[in-house]
Amino acid sequence: MADPRTPLIASDDHLAHAGLVELVAGREVACYESPERAIAIRDALLASGAYARQAPDLHGPDPISAVHEVELIDLVEHVWSDAIADGWNPSRPLLPDTFLLREYGPMMLESRPVARHLRLGAYCFDTATPIVAGTANAARAAVDIALTAADRVLEGAPLAYGLCRPPGHHAGRNLIGGYCYFNNAAIVAQSLIDRGAQRVAILDVDFHHGNGTQQIFWQRDDVLYVSLHGDPGWVYPYFSGYAAERGEGRGEGTNLNIPLAAETDGDGYLAALTDGLDAIAAFDPDAPLVLSLGFDTYHADPICNLALRTDDYARIGARIGELGLSVVALQEGGYAVEALGANAVAFLGGLREGLRDQ
């Protein structure tokens, strides 16, 4: 008899991606993105009895290089060892201190330091994406988690949940940022295309706009990106996520941003979500839905200005399930650690019910 529990793909490799700091308003603070986030979600889901933990399968480097440029992959893999060889204090996370801007001129990428840690600012767009000894391994494991969740859905599961840490949706083709190193959702979407899908939809319900996912598929008509997020006129990442951004070239019309006003509550969120789900239905995907799942829309999240409550997540999950698509759900943000477990149980439980009713 088949196991009725939902696959929960998780790894402990993320635990070494720890001791992280970021700069906020010029001050060094502990990162909100911490191992405790994943632990809280994992423990709550397993305690519910509805999820079966599975280790990720190894998928190798090719799915990553299908989305990210070689220079970025090389940087993530080796920047820490370069820094250590140059005398970096191993107890201190690595952050860029000089950023490459287009005003440097046409030779800016040809003229660059040899050591990777000295050119980190050419690939990182903020001061919130620290690198430590365990970062590269954690980022690779998160990709394997995401791809294994996709495998389980393609094998017949209506839903699989990938407990990805670090998250991914801010990582672009050649950029890291926003706690993200490899774009887990984009890698899964590309993998589905490579396995024969013609139309893949990504729904991003994290509080922050997935600027990396948007960039990767900006000129593509085979991947629809729909994102509900806080108004970037006031919240990170500030420079992307506006409603006027619709894609370019062949991709025009396959990018839908739905910025939300501060204090949007559950009813308001569901109304906006309906527009996103209608766009997905019209796109008519022939592959599982890729869901970038963030719980930083919670009213008590330290870096959120929306007003969702735990019960709202069950309603949102159920509404997504009503699309009738199988779902690869991949963890992105969510930083109110004390509420993460309950919010994950509510959302995924609602999604399970919505899928069951189809």
Image (cartoon, rainbow, N blue to C red):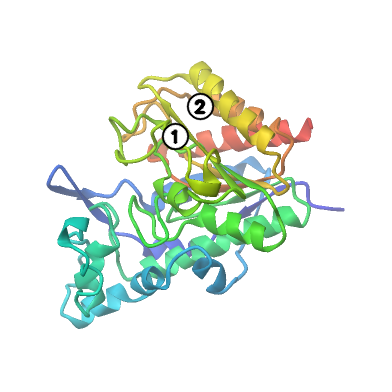
Q: Position of residue 298 (x, y in %)?
A: 42, 30
List the residue tagged with mark 1: 339
Q: Which residue is mark 2?
A: 310
Residue 317 seen by the camera: no
Q: 309 or 68, which lies in front?
A: 68
Q: Few, some or many C-alpha atoms within 10 Å of disc 1 (few <14, some 14-19, many ≥20)?
A: some
Q: Where 36 falls versus 79 (above or below)?
A: above
Which one is in front, 250 or 1? Answer: 250
| Residue drawn where x is 48% and y is 48% of the image | 218
Of the numbered discs 1 and 2, the one sitting upstream in the chain is 2
| C-alpha span from label 1 to label 2 | 8 Å
Three-letter code for the amino acid on which mark 1 is drawn: Ala
Percent position (x, y) of residue 355? Answer: 73, 35
Number of numbered callouts drawn: 2
* Left or right: 125, with 11 as reference point: left
Where's residue 288, x and y in %?
69, 47
Q: Is residue 71 visible?
A: yes
